Image (cartoon, helix red, strand yellow):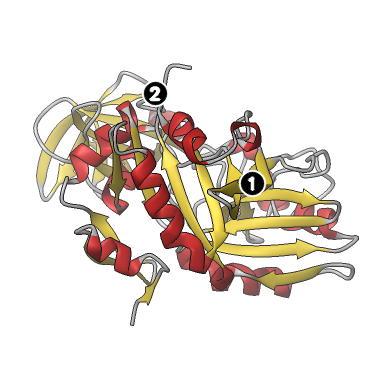
Amino acid sequence: MDKKTPLYDTHVKYGGKIVSFGGFALPVQYESGIKQEHMAVRTACGLFDVSHMGEIIVSGPKAVDFLNYILTNDFTDLKVDQARYSPMCNEHGGTVDDLIVYKRGENDYFVVVNAGNRDSDFAWMVDHRIDGVELVNASEDWGQLALQGPKAEAILAKVADPALIPAGYYTANFDAEIKGIPCILSRTGYTGEDGFEIYMAADKAADIWEILIEAGKDDGLLPCGLGARDTLRMEAAMPLYGHDMNEDISPKVAGLGFAIKMDKPDFIGKAAIEAATPLKVRRVGIKVTGRGIIREECDVYRDGEKIGYITSGTFLPYLGGSYGMAIVNSDKREIGAAVQVDVRSRMVDAEMVKLPFYKREK
């Protein structure tokens, strides 16, 4: 039986088409449809329920040492109210999950993990816990909304004190309020646009949803579902756990080398990642030049030879074409080179292109 987020009844009220995702009943789209929701985020603003994500509290005098050991990024210099993205690897260098770490205070960290992994991530952390670290799985306590798009800040400023809105990307305010309701405001997102992820007590999520919908009604704000969340993150070439990376795909292969700090003394998976360098396979963008929609697990060919496979693929509304992310043999990876993608036994013409497909103008 799928779990329901605190906003389930709200989604039904707004005409959300409910599907199963990561063990949760969530809207894939609303009556406006995926394309319109996608375009709203690119041109105005969209509001997403992401309460299915997990929240884990890591605290204690050895908290930063623990995070530096279980995660590939380095948190030594992370300041209070800053956030940092990181993969979490297994001993073989594969990806257990990717997550965001916030520093709430001295020796106090708020870690946000993917929905389908929130229990397994917590178990992984408990198994690798060191003395001087306390772990709490607080996932049931929190609701989370994502307000994304070029008009997100203007809409938020109608209902929150502008002085409390974090100015820098990957910064947060843990003492913010929306219309008097305590919340965390974080300038982060998964769409390729400017925007905010907003955390609140689970029983206040529906109230804040309604406040934001009302505040954005004259600015083109639309409620958005999982479908648009997926097409938006794909345009921005943001990897999705379980697709573009998993326990057998290292974050380095998935293009996340920027979040792997090999100069740290040690972390789980470091030796395996070192041993796998140089990479035999790498991530690349695929743009369809023929006709057809490419999907996950479709094989990619170059000059008749299979060189890799699609990890995520679909039609991208803002760019107006079929695109995918692929993992291909490093020696066959060449930007601009023609390839073919096997879509249900039909070869579709495409080419290798740079990632991301879309980058917003700042």
Residue shown at 28%/33% (left/top)?
A: 220
Q: Which mark is residue 47?
A: none
Depth check, front residue: 267 or 49:
49
Badge 2 is on which residue?
354
The residues tagged by marks 2 and 1 sit, at their Cα atoms, a distance apart of 39 Å
Residue shown at 33%/46% (left/top)?
A: 230
The extreme bottom residue here reads 1
Q: Residues within 10 Å of mark 1 (few under 14, many from 20)?
A: many
Residue shown at 42%/68% (left/top)?
A: 6
Residue 312 is at least partly visible in this image = no
Depth check, front residue: 191 or 313:
191
Q: Is residue 96 left or right of residue 205?
A: right
- Whether pointer 2 and pointer 1 mark residues with C-beta atoms closer than 8 Å, the reply is no
Q: Residues within 10 Å of mark 2 (few under 14, many from 20)?
A: some
Q: Is residue 261 left or right of residue 245?
A: right
Residue shown at 74%/55% (left/top)?
A: 109
Residue 229 is at least partly visible in this image = yes
Q: Earlier in the sequence, mark 2 or mark 1?
A: 1
Give the image quarter of residue 12.
bottom left
Eyeballing the image, is 153 above or below 189?
above
Depth check, front residue: 157 or 287:
157
Q: Position of residue 289 (x, y in %)?
A: 16, 25
Q: Is residue 341 left or right of residue 55?
A: left
Q: Is residue 146 left or right of residue 96?
A: left
Which of discs 2 and 1 lies nearer the camera? The answer is 1
Q: Amino acid at mark 2?
A: Lys
Q: Amino acid at mark 1?
A: Ala
Badge 1 is on which residue?
176
Is disc 2 placed on a helix, strand or loop? Answer: loop
Give the image quarter of residue 135.
bottom right
